[in-house]
Image (cartoon, grey):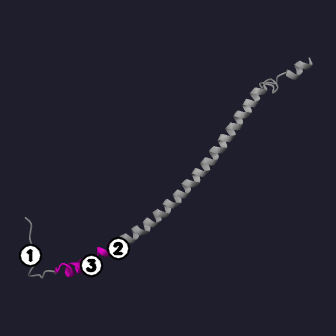
Amino acid sequence: MKGERSRRRTRGAAPVTDNPRGVRYGVAVLAAAVFVSALAVVYVKHRGRVLFVQLQTLERERDAMQVERGQLQLEESTWATHDRIERVARERLGLVIPSSEETVLVRSR
């Protein structure tokens, strides 16, 4: 009876003394799973940091480009003013505004 009592099973669980090789195998599998999980955590954290640095770099580039775009739009509006266009036409091309006698009105049919 004494031997039977030490080998008696509890509900649903195998006694630890039945198969020590299986226990070692189970522990080894769990240790490997923990190790792989730890490596995955390290990789994901590193990848996240690398991507965050790239994001910051791209945001700085975007901000610089937005500033440059604003400056170019201001420059474009300066170059396209009517006064400037008339001045360049007079100075560089020698154009003049025609007098009323030189102006001809053409009517469409």
Mark 1 and mark 2 residues within 8 Å of each other at the beta carbon: no
Q: Amino acid at mark 3?
A: Arg
Residue situated in front as seen by the camera: 91 or 109: 91
Q: Is residue 108 left or right of residue 52?
A: left
Q: Residue at x 70, y 33 (%)?
A: 29
Q: Which mark is residue 104?
A: 1
Figure quadrant of residue 34: top right
Q: Identify residue for label 2.
A: 75
Label 2, residues with CA under 10 Å away: few <14, some 14-19, many ≥20? few
Q: Pinpoint residue 13: horizontal percent, then vertical percent.
A: 78, 26
Residue situated in front as seen by the camera: 79 or 45: 45
SS of the residue at dot 3? helix
Q: Residue at x 65, y 40 (%)?
A: 36
First of labels 1, 2 by sequence position: 2
First of labels 3, 2 by sequence position: 2
Label 1, residues with CA under 10 Å away: few <14, some 14-19, many ≥20? few
Q: Quadrant of the C terminus?
A: bottom left
Q: Identify residue for label 3.
A: 84
Q: Quadrant of the N terminus?
A: top right
Q: Amino acid at mark 2?
A: Glu
Q: Is residue 15 left or right of residue 82?
A: right
Task: Reply yes or no: does residue 61 show up in magenta.
Answer: no
Task: Give the magenta range.
Answer: 74-95
